[in-house]
Structure formats: structure tokens, C-alpha cells
Image: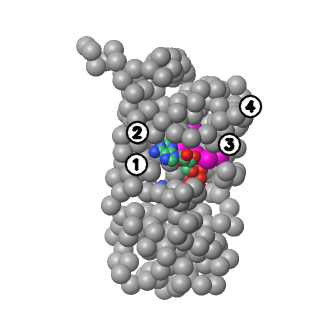
Amino acid sequence: MDLLIKETAEIIKESKFTLAFTGAGISVESGIPPFRGEDGLWNKYNPEVLDLGYYMNNPEECWVYIREIFYDFFADAKPNKAHQVLARMEHEGLLHSLVTQNIDNLHQEAGSRIVHEFHGNSKRLVCRKCGEVYDANKMDLKKIPPRCVADQEILKPDFIFFGEGISPSAFENSFADAEKCQVCIIVGSTGEVTPASHVPRAAKQNGATIIEINPRESLFTDSVTDIHLQGTASKVLAQLEQYLFSQKESV
Ligand code: NAD
């Protein structure tokens, strides 16, 4: 594994444009469970509360669960080593774009600047009537549902619900970067969610080398992955960091 990590670091160093594509798995070590799998959120909650049609008809009921999942439970989550290494790679010119399916804002909190939020961001609440955007951290969510100051409309978290379209700018920027990248690093994604999972597939079609970091196999592993670094995101990215920045640290 050590040799494979070292070789992978060399491939990343040689790449002129590297894209990271992250899923729920990168935030597991920050204490945020994924949706799917044994400890997944869908074993505890009904995904219906995030269905746009159901939400529009039952916002008060949905907000009880939305608050519990996204604003009580996840509120104290902090970026972990994996988020930090990706941010450092960007700062040092080794990562040029990041597409995340996550809505937890942890990449931004770790210092990543070029983040395409494919599924939006839970830290923003939006008024669907007038478009006003609110910072969720500054809202008093003891009283739900939260409402727009201007028109009293119920605010919706600014992430994509089931049945809702992807923001055109996030979609276009993600695929534009996928098409020009030479290396794509997939971290912690099952590859089951479309159209997000088409991003690394577009990279592969355009000749990129696909590196996957995941303790388990995913739908990507046997279809597009060139190098599978089998392990948790923080452990593998910490190992990669050592080789990526080894010269700098020994000076
Ligand atoms: P997923 O929930 O379908 O799968 C998680 C993947 O992470 C699995 O392949 C699993 O093997 C892997 N994994 C688990 N622990 C890991 C670790 N420590 N390090 C690396 N990988 C690990 O995730 P998904 O494919 O990203 O799709 C779910 C959708 O749900 C996403 O689109 C996302 O919007 C949303 N979601 C987001 C969050 C978040 O913002 N943190 C949390 C749950 C779900």
C-alpha cells in the first residue's frame, strides 16, 4: 500500500489539472453518517421528509426532522484530516477544483475555496418566494419552521431535495472541470446518486486517471477507477500528504 500511495502522489504531482469529487464518506470521520449503508441515516429517518413534493405539502412536519438531522445533530461537526489535506492541496497548487455532493460546508470550513456544491449547502436557508438567503448559523431554529422576514414565507434549506433540479451553475462548472482534468480523486462516494456520479465518469471519458479513496468498493471501483486506495479518507489522505509535500517538509 505504501508504494501505491507513493506512486499515486507522483501522478497527482505531475497532473496539470486535478479534480476532487467527494461524497458523504469524507465526512463520516467528522461524525456525520452517510445516507446509505448499515449506519446510514435512511435506517433511522424516512427519506420522504426530503422529498420536494412532500415537503411543499407538509413543511412543518418535515422541518422537525430537518432540524434534528441537519441543525441539531450535525451542528458541531468539524472538518477532519481529509478535508484539511484537500484544502492544503488546493493552496499548494496540487488541486484545482473540488466537486462535492456534501451539503455540510466542511470543505469550505477547512479552507477549500473552489468548491462546486453539486447538491447545495445546508448552512444557507432560502425564501422560495423572494429569493432572500439567510445564514442558518445566525437563525434561531428553536422555533420552526423558520420564516422570511420580508414575506413570512417558510424558508427551505438551500440543498437539493429529492425531485429538485441541480443548480445550473454547479452542474456546468462541475462537468466543465471534469472534462478538462487529468486526474480525478473520488473520496467516499457509492456512485449511486445521479447525475452527480456522472462527474467522475465524464473525467474518465476524457482520459483522466481516476483515483478512488474508499474503505469499500463502490459502483466506480470496477467501472472507472484506475487506482483504488482502500482505507478511510483521513488515513489515506494523510498518507498521501506525506509524499505530496515530502520535499517541502524536509527542507
Ligand atoms: P453514500 O452515503 O451513498 O455513501 C457513502 C460512501 O462513503 C460509501 O461508499 C462508503 O463506503 C464510504 N465511506 C464510509 N466511510 C468512509 C470513510 N471513513 N472514508 C471514506 N469513505 C467512506 O454517499 P454518497 O454517494 O455521497 O451519496 C449520498 C448523498 O447524500 C450525497 O449526494 C450527499 O448529498 C448526501 N449526503 C451528504 C452528507 C453530508 O453532507 N455530509 C451526509 C449524508 C448524505
Q: Is residue 206 in view from this perspective?
A: yes
Q: Does the closest atom of ligand 1 sit within 8 Å of the Cβ of label 2?
A: yes
State the CA–CA distance, disc 4 to disc 3.
16 Å
Q: Is-magenta flag for residue 188?
A: yes
Task: Give the residue displayed 53% in from the left and 30% down from the top.
Answer: 229
Residue pointed to by mark 3: 219
Q: Position of residue 212 (x, y in %)?
A: 57, 34
State the CA–CA distance, disc 4 to disc 2.
28 Å
Closer to viewer: mark 4 or mark 2: 2
Snapshot quadrant of residue 165: bottom right
State the CA–CA distance, disc 1 to disc 3.
22 Å
Q: Out of 247 and 25, give the one closest to the viewer.
A: 25
Horizontally, residue 207 falls left or right of residue 122, namely right
Q: Which mark is residue 205?
A: 4
Identify residue type, mark 3. Answer: Leu
Q: Main secondary structure of the magenta part?
A: loop
Horizontally, residue 36 falls left or right of residue 197, namely left
Q: Which mark is residue 234?
A: 2
Q: Out of 149 and 162, give the one closest to the viewer.
A: 162
Q: Secondary structure at mark 2?
A: helix
Q: Does the closest atom of ligand 1 sit within 8 Å of the Cβ of label 1?
A: yes
